[in-house]
């Protein structure tokens, strides 16, 4: 088995078993593997068949095979964009890994639903494998009852879940697709967001400038089903990722115990 190249993020692994060449792409963060095979038209030996069987079993254990992944904007649980009602408003925030941001906002009283997805880029119907190539960021859409929680209160919560001074990503996740962004849906949200950001800058809480962008919302694409409610559906993997991401350690240092 010869590894051609393997990194700690989205990675690819090629190896040869006899004359059977297997190519694998693997996302380390969510354990999702997609499998492509290329081999000459020859009969496989029993040992090669056994090796391939074991490999496929390992891929199934690691996560969902890409061919069975839901299409963008749809998922097996039906968690997609919601229709607005008279009491519901929507907010869209990017704060790094959407698993963490989703889980944090679901705990806020007055929040009805949180959806992980992609926004801010030019490509239509992006997927987890390509969203970062066209300017999209990982984000969440928050549907909230504005009679129970205000947009200002959501912003206050948002600042306490991120490092707003980091323009290059969030914690262990690096790259512009993990940066913090507030996407405003109307002029009132823009006004409140700009005021909230200015107040945070004046507070002196952070020594570095606030790098969080405030951008007009355009369109939101719900992420694949396996990303939705990840903290609930994959609690062990989520806890492991979050513990090792550095997020909670940073937040405790800046804000103290919750």
Image (tube, helix red, strand yellow):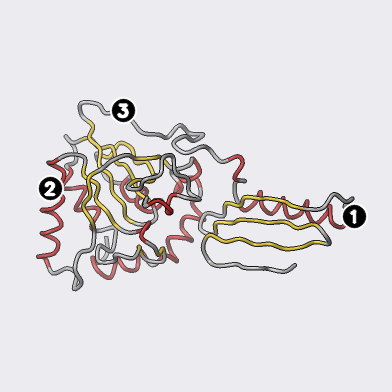
From what the image shows, is residue 257 above or below residue 236?
Answer: below
**Which residue in the structure is indicated by mark 2?**
192
Q: Residue at x 34, y 52 (%)?
A: 101
Q: Residue at x 78, y 51 (%)?
A: 53
Instruction: Name the mark on residue 83.
Output: 3
Residue 192, image x and y in percent? 12, 48
- Callout 3 environment at 10 Å: few (<14), some (14 to 19), or many (20+)? few
From what the image shows, is residue 218 above or below residue 177?
Answer: above
- As helix, strand or loop, the secondary structure at mark 2 comes to helix
**Which residue in the structure is indicated by mark 1?**
45
Q: Nearer the viewer, mark 1 or mark 2?
A: 1
Q: Is residue 205 left or right of residue 127?
A: left
Q: How many marks?
A: 3
Residue 68, image x and y in percent? 60, 39
- Callout 2 environment at 10 Å: few (<14), some (14 to 19), or many (20+)? some
Q: Is residue 256 left or right of residue 51?
A: left
Q: Is residue 28 left or right of residue 121?
A: right
Disc on the earlier residue, 3 or 1: 1
Q: Residue at x 48, y 61 (%)?
A: 240
Instruction: Name the mark on residue 116.
Output: none
- Cα gap from disc 2 to disc 3, whole angstroms: 23 Å
Q: Is residue 41 left or right of residue 24?
A: right
């Amino acid at each position: 088995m010869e590894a051609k190249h393997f990194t700690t993020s989205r990675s690819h692994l090629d190896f040869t078993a006899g004359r059977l060449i297997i190519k694998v792409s693997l996302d380390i963060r969510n354990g999702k593997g997609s499998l492509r095979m290329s081999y000459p038209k020859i009969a496989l030996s029993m040992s090669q068949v056994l090796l391939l069987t074991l490999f496929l079993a390992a891929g199934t254990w690691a996560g969902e095979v890409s061919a069975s992944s839901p299409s963008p904007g749809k998922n097996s649980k039906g968690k997609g964009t919601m229709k607005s009602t008279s009491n519901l408003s929507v907010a869209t925030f990017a704060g790094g890994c959407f698993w963490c941001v989703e889980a944090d906002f679901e705990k806020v009283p007055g929040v009805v639903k949180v959806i992980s997805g992609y926004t801010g880029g030019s490509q239509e119907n992006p997927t987890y494998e390509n969203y970062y190539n066209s300017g999209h960021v990982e984000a969440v859409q928050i549907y909230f009852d504005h009679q129970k929680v205000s947009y200002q209160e959501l912003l206050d919560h948002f600042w306490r879940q991120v490092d707003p001074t980091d323009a290059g990503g969030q914690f262990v996740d690096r790259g512009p697709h993990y940066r913090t962004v507030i996407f405003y849906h109307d002029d009132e949200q823009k006004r409140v967001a700009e005021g909230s950001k200015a107040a945070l800058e004046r507070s002196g809480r952070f020594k570095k400038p606030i790098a969080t962008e405030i951008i007009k919302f355009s369109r939101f694409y719900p992420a694949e089903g396996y990303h939705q409610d990840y903290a609930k559906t994959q609690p062990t993997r989520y806890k492991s990722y979050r513990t090792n991401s550095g997020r909670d350690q940073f937040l405790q240092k800046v804000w103290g115990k919750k």
